[in-house]
């Protein structure tokens, strides 16, 4: 009843407003004033005055049409309310239920439209197109990133070994030089002592055979020690060269694998506009959430349309 009174008052006001703009009012303008204005000496002013009156009439006609449309709409609402008020409680129940569903679904739909989108449309479309493949892509990308880390560590270890072997080779080469120098000094000392013993034995007629034998034995032992150390250094140099060459071969294989894996990782990241597998996995999770929301939105829109028609 309250709604009926409100709409009746609005109806009365609309009718009064419409009557204010009735076209018949323009026929009741003071003829004498119009004639006086039109008979003035300035033709331009008279023309402008007529044009202004025509514009006012056009605007008034538009206002009347707008008010008439609004009046018809209000009347329609009033009739609907009157019909509902005349229904029994049993007849009102399904209508109230439908109205409740419509309000609830409209709120859900509005909430979804106001929700900030997790992905851009291009990202969502790409994820949707390759939804079945993305879990496998994420798995391969993780494996490739792990392989990249392993390759980096292996290359770092190889570089460390190469540096270690280079230092050992340099030390062995240095030791070889020392042994060659020591051998030269030993030879010179041995010859000097042997010559000195020969001179003393000849000049003083002394038997220095035992001394010369001891010197010779000492020289042989020292020479053997120098020779062994030299051979050890030579063997170390050869072994370090072998190790280094093998390390270079292994390093080349690791680098080739690293480059291939890096290209695969870069291609995947560029394709999906991500930086790593973790970010791709995050975006995929966001896609799944948004896909569920869109499906709910589709069902909500369908239900809303159904209950609205009902």
Image: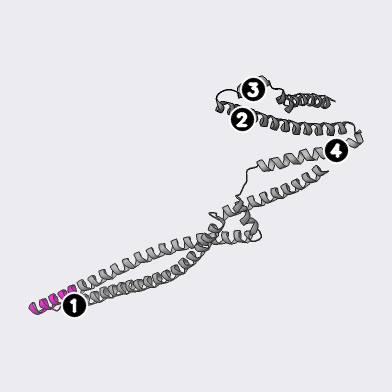
Q: Quadrant of the N terminus?
A: top right
The disc placed on residue 35 is 3
Q: Is residue 167 above or below residue 29?
A: below
Q: Separation of disc 1 and disc 4 at Cα?
A: 133 Å
Majority SS type along the magenta span: helix
Q: Is residue 29 above or below residue 104?
A: above
Query: What scheme was used to colour the molecule?
Result: one colour
Q: Separation of disc 4 and disc 3 at Cα?
A: 62 Å
Asked if residue 209 lies left or right of residue 294, the reply is: left
Residue to which mark 2 is pinned: 51
Residue 8 location, x and y as percent?
A: 81, 25
Residue to which mark 1 is pinned: 212
Which residue is painted at 48% across and 65% down in the image? 259
Q: Which residues are magenta?
A: 188-212
Q: Which of the two residues, 213 or 270, is positioned nearer the viewer here?
A: 270
Q: Separation of disc 4 and disc 2 at Cα?
A: 54 Å
Q: Which of the two residues, 116 or 262, is positioned nearer the viewer here?
A: 116
Kindly state the secondary structure of the residue where label 4 is placed: helix
Residue to which mark 4 is pinned: 95
Q: Is residue 22 visible?
A: no
| Res 77 → quadrant | top right
């Amino acid at each position: 009843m309250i709604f009926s009174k409100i709409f009746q008052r609005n109806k009365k006001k609309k009718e009064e407003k419409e009557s204010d703009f009735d076209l018949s009012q323009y026929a009741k303008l003071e003829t004498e004033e119009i004639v006086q204005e039109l008979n003035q000496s300035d033709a331009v002013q008279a023309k402008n005055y007529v044009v202004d009156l025509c514009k006012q009439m056009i605007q008034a006609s538009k206002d009347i049409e707008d008010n008439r449309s609004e009046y018809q709409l209000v009347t329609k609402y009033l009739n609907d309310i009157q019909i509902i008020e005349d229904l029994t409680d049993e007849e009102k129940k399904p209508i109230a239920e439908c109205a409740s569903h419509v309000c609830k679904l409209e709120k859900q739909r509005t909430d979804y439209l106001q929700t900030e989108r997790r992905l851009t449309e291009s990202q969502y479309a790409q994820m949707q197109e390759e939804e079945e493949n993305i879990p496998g892509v994420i798995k391969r990308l993780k494996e490739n990133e792990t392989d990249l880390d392993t390759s980096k560590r292996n290359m770092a270890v190889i570089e460390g070994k190469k540096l270690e072997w280079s230092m050992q080779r340099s030390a062995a080469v240095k030791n070889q030089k020392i042994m060659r120098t020591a051998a030269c000094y030993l030879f010179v000392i041995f010859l000097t002592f042997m010559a000195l013993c020969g001179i003393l034995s000849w000049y003083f007629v002394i038997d220095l055979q035992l001394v010369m034998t001891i010197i010779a034995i000492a020289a042989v032992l020292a020479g053997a020690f120098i020779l062994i150390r030299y051979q050890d250094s030579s063997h170390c140099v050869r072994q370090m060269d072998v190790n280094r060459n093998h390390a270079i071969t292994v390093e080349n294989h690791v680098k080739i694998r690293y480059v291939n894996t890096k290209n695969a990782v870069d291609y995947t990241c560029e394709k999906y506009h991500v930086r790593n597998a973790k970010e791709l996995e995050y975006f995929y999770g966001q896609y799944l959430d948004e896909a569920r929301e869109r499906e709910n939105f589709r069902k909500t829109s369908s239900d809303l349309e159904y209950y609205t028609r009902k």
